[in-house]
Amino acid sequence: MTRSKSFADLIKNCPSVIRALPNIPQGEVSNVVFDSRKVVAGSVFVAFEGEYFDGHCFIGDAVSRGATLVVGTQAKWVEEYPNIYLRVEDARKALAYLSAAYHDFPARKLVVIGVTGTDGKTTTVNLIYQVLKQAGMKVGMISTVNAVIGEEAIDTGFHVTTPESPMVQELLARMVENGMTHVVLETTSHGLAQQRVAACEYDIGVITNVTHEHLDYHGTYESYVQTKTKLLTMLTETLPKRSGNIRLAVINKDDQSYSFVTFLLSEPAFENIQIAAYSRKDKAEIKVAHEEHSLEGLRLQIDCAGQMIHVESHLVGEYNVSNILAAVGATSLGLKIAPETISRGIKALGGVPGRMERINMGQNFSAIVDFAHTPNAIKVTLQTARELTRKRVLAVFGSAGLRDREKRKMMAIEGVNLADICIFTAEDPRTEKLEDILNEMVTAAEGVGGVEGKDYLVVPDRGDAIRQALKLAHSDDLVIVCGKGHEQSMCFETTEYPWDDRTAVRAALCELLGKEGPNMPYLPTSMYKKRAD
């Protein structure tokens, strides 16, 4: 759909302007971009300092391509481009609001449910989405797996993070154009810290948990929690909507972040936010009255503010009980959906891609792919794997390069403590040496008594690591490959190589069983010799 917006329309909605323009450019805006290669005549180009590049270095290129308005934070460009350079305090926030203004602020026309947390975000988003569908609501979804608008599923990127704000606002606008009334938006800490979800006008905010992750970026656990809690504080910034203002925060009373989150929300500025806690273990507005676990899934009785909701789910594991409680809180207390509708919605979710996803090629043992890539996720995933077999659990995983180094040690320790055999392997090493990452995992594993060849193996090539685990599996064992889940690439140096753990497991199983099947995806680790040999 062609949008007609003047530069004056956008500039009046741009926050934190330091230096205004002497004359506002004339004509219509073509687009709002932060990549100079996408600039055309009439573009608004927003420059910000990123992790690897400084967008200000591309201002000249953007202008030569036809940018009519340039937005940035650095003062030196005022003299060079006095008539088109708008200086702001926060370019990322400006990018979000300019994008939202270009699309006529679509979030103001939707009920927006945001879900953040270290683990469980995608599953909780999908649970809420299914409940809203069962309630007959026209609902869209944006997750780190994909975006769903009606019957259309749209890839949101190779790796797990909230898309940049222009894409978020474009997706929200498409939902409005397609008659959506509600959207469930998975919201990462990077998305919050980098203003990718500014102008999203949240109505309900859910925090699943805050465990050890991304401390390389956030610095401390406290800072990480504060960033996650920003989703809830943003509820106060939502402007009045025709549908009303819900302003509900749904938080996990069982999580270590609970006291910190409630302390932050106790400030007078947040007195209009409703807070609903959920718990498996304690008294709370949303709590478990009864739960049953089996290989087929979960059976729960949930007490939601005195209203009993009976739930059957195909999901497994205690951590998914918590995800279900979060979804119940958002849909029952926030959206007033009837208990029987909530029950149908939760049961309708068969599974989430790359989350405890079973791969069956006719083998006599279980093979599962899961996204677990944090210490807590590895812990709860392997605990759940233990419940799914009476035999051995064999786990394959690595730890990402250029990310929180401490977690690779913690993950190795959890693996050795909970699995019968761990195979440490490649997982997005990026520009770090893979050997260094694996050595850190080995040191941690041996620090808790792990013995190479008995408790753990090191197989740098991920395809070979998966092959090795499957070869070692006996009847009724369980092999679980963790860390990549639904993701479609793996990064070595600065190159993303096509990679899907599910395809890799199918390929290795077909090799093992002598069947025709997919080829093992290529990774540039053929130079490594398997230490297990």
Image: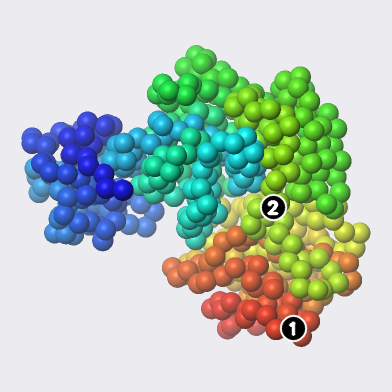
Residue 376: x, y in percent?
69, 47
Q: Secondary structure at mark 2?
A: loop
CB within 8 Å, label 1 to label 2:
no
Q: What residue is pinned by disc 2?
A: 351
Quadrant in the picture for the C terminus: bottom right
Q: Is residue 485 above or below residue 472?
A: above
Give the crowd class for mark 1: few <14, some 14-19, many >=20 residues within 10 Å. few
Q: Secondary structure at mark 1?
A: loop
| Residue in view at x 18 percent, y 39 percent | 6
Is residue 100 in view from this perspective? yes
Is residue 418 shown left or right of residue 342? Answer: right
Is residue 119 in view from this perspective? no
Is residue 224 shown left or right of residue 359? Answer: left
| Residue in view at x 69 percent, y 52 percent | 351
Residue 460: x, y in percent?
64, 74
Kind of residue indicated by mark 1: Lys
Residue 439: x, y in percent?
64, 67
Kind of residue indicated by mark 2: Gly
Q: Earlier in the sequence, mark 1 or mark 2?
A: 2
Say which of 410 and 205 sits in front.
Answer: 205
Residue 59: x, y in percent?
19, 54
Say which of 215 and 131 sits in front.
Answer: 131
Say which of 85 and 123 sits in front.
Answer: 123
Q: What residue is pinned by disc 1?
A: 515
Label disc, if present, on residue 55 of the rendered structure: none
| Residue in view at x 64 percent, y 79 percent | 518
Q: Is residue 221 above or below residue 479?
A: above
Residue 24 figure quarter: top left
Give the crowd class for mark 2: few <14, some 14-19, many >=20 residues within 10 Å. some
Q: What whole-number distance in Å separates the C-alpha atoms at marks 1 and 2?
A: 27 Å
Residue 287 figure quarter: top right
